[in-house]
Image (spheres, rainbow, N blue to C red):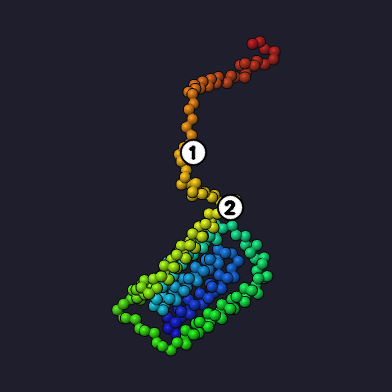
Amino acid sequence: MSTTTGLFYLFSAVLLFAAFRVITARNPVHAALYLVLTFFQGAMVWMLLGAEFLSITLVLVYVGAVMVLFLFVVMMMDINVENLRDGFWTHFPLIALIGVVIALEMSAVLMGGFRVAAPLPDPAADVPNTLQLGKLLYSEYLYPVEIAAAILLVAMIAAIALTLRARKDSKYVSPGEQVRVRAADRLTVLKMDASQVDAAPEESPPHDAAATDPTPGTKP
């Protein structure tokens, strides 16, 4: 077994374990962190396959942006984990059925792709895969890229709206009210008459109790 093959099996095993923990972790923050580990292992597998651009994109985009957004949403939303666990086993048959249907559809599509006998065209030796991918994305797939960017923008706006919604434990400020604010509404100048404050009288030094209060039977 070569070093590349050993690393591939290692990264794949960690990827499967992390993906399993994403759906079995009880804490949403732990599940998001396991998803970060899954993305990293997938990036390493792509690096072994020679897809450097896809590997770096997976780390920068998904780990550096999307997962940070997930963590902020999970930590800032008021999620009661106990209430989410109550109806899990009640809806488990439907969840299992949907999972089996999705797995069968993906298997049918992937096995159909594996049965293709036509060889793939070899890329040019002097052209890097990043340049080829860029030309392909921004020429033949320009509109799908723009649609994906619009979907990500809508998702980002929705996440911000969820975190800034009015809650009893959140400090919500309306942006419209901040824009329409005026200095006259926030600052009031009061005119007060001048007044003189008398100085406090100086305190007299304490007297000696023996000098002021003579003992009984003695003359002052």
Q: Tell whether 119 sits left or right of 15.
A: left
- Where is 196 relative to 130, above or below? above
Crowd band around label 2 with a 10 angstrom C-alpha radius: few (<14), some (14–19), many (20+): few
Examine the rendered structure and indicate whether residue 183 appears above or below residue 211. Answer: below
**In which quadrant of the rendered view does residue 133 lie?**
bottom left
Residue 214: quadrant of the picture: top right
**Front position among marks 1 and 2:** 1
Q: Are marks 1 and 2 in contact (CB under 8 Å)?
A: no
Q: Mark 1 — residue?
A: 185
> Is 80 rendered above or below residue 125?
above
Quadrant of image for the N terminus: bottom left
Q: Which amino acid, mark 2?
A: Arg
Q: In this view of the protein, can residue 59 be seen by the observer?
A: no
Q: Position of residue 113 (x, y in %)?
A: 47, 84
Q: Nearer the viewer, residue 92 or 205?
A: 92
Residue 10 percent location from the top left of the image = 48, 77
Helix, strand or loop at mark 2: loop
Q: Tell me which corner region of the image, top left, top right, bottom left or bottom right, holds residue 92.
A: bottom right
Give the x, y percent position of residue 4. Answer: 42, 80
Disc 1 residue type? Asp
Q: Is residue 161 left or right of residue 97?
A: left
Q: Residue at x 51, y 63 (%)?
A: 70
- Mark closest to the chain's N terminus, 1 or 2: 2
At a point 44% along the width and 82% down the height, the residue shown is 5
Q: Which residue is mark 2?
A: 167
**Residue 219 sits above or below residue 89 on the image:** above
Using the image, tell me which numbered label, if any, was put on residue 89.
none
Residue occupying the point 53% across, 76% down: 16
Toward the top, the furthest residue is: 219
Q: Is residue 189 visible?
A: yes
Which residue sits furthest front?
143
Asked which secondary structure carries label 1, the reply is helix
